[in-house]
Amino acid sequence: MDYSDTRAIVTGGGSGIGLAIARGLAQRGCKVAIVDVAAGIAKAAAASIGRGAVALVCDVSRHEDVEALCGEAEAALGGIVNLVFANAGVSHGGPILKARPEEMDWVLGVNVRGVWSTLAVFGNRLIEAGMPGHLCITASEHSLGLQHAGGAFYTTSKHAVLGMAEVFRAELPATVGISVFCPGLTATNLHLTGALGPKAVDPAQESFAAKIIGRGMDAGEVAGACIAGVERGDFLIVSHPVSIIAARRRAAEVESAFAQQAPWTDDAMRYDVNSVIAAVVAGNDNSGKESKT
C-alpha cells in the first residue's frame, strides 16, 4: 500500500494501541493526526512519533466535536482523511447487577456513539468527495464471545460496534472499506480510563487490573496486525489466537440451538428478511404467502 499521499486520524491515539497504530502509519509515510480527549497526552504522543504527526483534541462522545474534528484534521493534514481509525474507548468494571445507569451511558457514549460519530462524519466526507478510503473500528475479542465476567458494559459496547460495522459494510459504497479489529489482552493503559467516568475508582481494583493488563501482548505487535489487516482489506481482523476459544464456543452453541429448536426446512427461505424486502420493493404481493405444504 502506498502511503505517500495518505492522511489518517487515530482517535484514542495518545497511548496504547492507538499510539502504536499512529506510529506504524507514520513509519510507513502516512500523514497522521493523533486524536485524544486530553491535549497534553495528544501533543506528547505526536512529539514522540515525529515525522510530522499532529495532535488534535476531541471528545468523540460529542457528535458536534467530531464534526469540528473533521475540518481540523483536513486543515492540519492538508486534505481529506483517507484512513479513519475509530480507536477511542473506555473500560468499566464491576458486577452488572450493581451498576448504575450513568455508568452504562458513559461507556456506550464513548465506545458506541463515539464510533458511530467518527465513522459517519468521516465516512460521509469521503463519499461526498468521491474519494476512496478505509474505516477501521477497534473493537475487542469481547465482540466474538464472552471473555470474562465483570465487564458487562464494555462487552456490550464491543458487541454493538461489531453489529454496527456489519451494517456499515452493507451500506458503504465500494470505494470505502471497513474493518473491525478484535484484539485480545494487550499491555495498555485501558484500566486507567475509569478515572474519566462517573464511578469513583477503587484503587485495589485498579491495581488488580493493572497486573492483568500488564501481561498482555505488546501494543506494537497488536497494532501491526491491525495495519496489516487494513492493508489486505479484511473485514474482521484478529491478533490473539486464544480469542478463538470463545468464538468457537459461541458458534457451537448457536449451531446446537438451531439444530434442536429450528432445524432447516425446505421453505425456510420464505422468511429470509432480505428476500422479503427485495420482494416487497419489487411489488411482489405474493411474497411470504406461499403454502407451507
Image: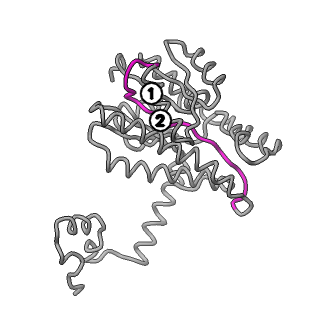
Q: Which of 256 and 100 is in front in this view?
A: 100
Q: Is residue 191 left or right of residue 255?
A: right
Q: How crowded is mark 2: few (under 14 residues within 10 Å), some or many (20 or more)?
A: some
- The circle on residue 67 is 2
Using the image as rendered, state which of residue 28 and residue 7 is in the foreground.
Answer: 7
Foreground residue, 104 or 208? 104
- Indicate whether residue 89 is drawn in magenta: yes
Write down the residue under mark 1. 71
Query: Vertical placement of 19 versus 137: above or below?
Result: above
**Quarter of the rendering containing residue 234:** top left
Q: Does the magenta stretch include residue 81?
A: yes
Quadrant in which the C terminus appears: bottom left
| Amino acid type of the residue tagged 2 in the rendering | Glu
Q: Which residue is drawn at 28% across and 42% down?
A: 173
The magenta segment is 76-96
Q: Residues within 10 Å of mark 1 (few under 14, many from 20)?
A: some
Q: What is the secondary structure assignment of the residue under circle 2?
A: helix
Q: Who's the residue at 63% across and 52% down the image?
A: 105
Give how far across and how far down residue 278 sits, in percent.
22, 64
Could you tell me residue 15's position as x and y percent? 61, 28
The residue furthest top is: 51
Residue placed most toward the observer, 40 or 224: 40
Q: How many labels does the image show?
A: 2
Q: Distance between the residues labelled 2 and 1?
A: 7 Å
Where is the N terminus found, in terms of image quarters? top left
Kindly indicate whether the residue at mark 1 contacts the one at mark 2 (C-beta within 8 angstroms).
Answer: yes
Residue at screen point 47% across, 39% down: 118
Give the left or right position of residue 126, taking residue 283 as reference: right
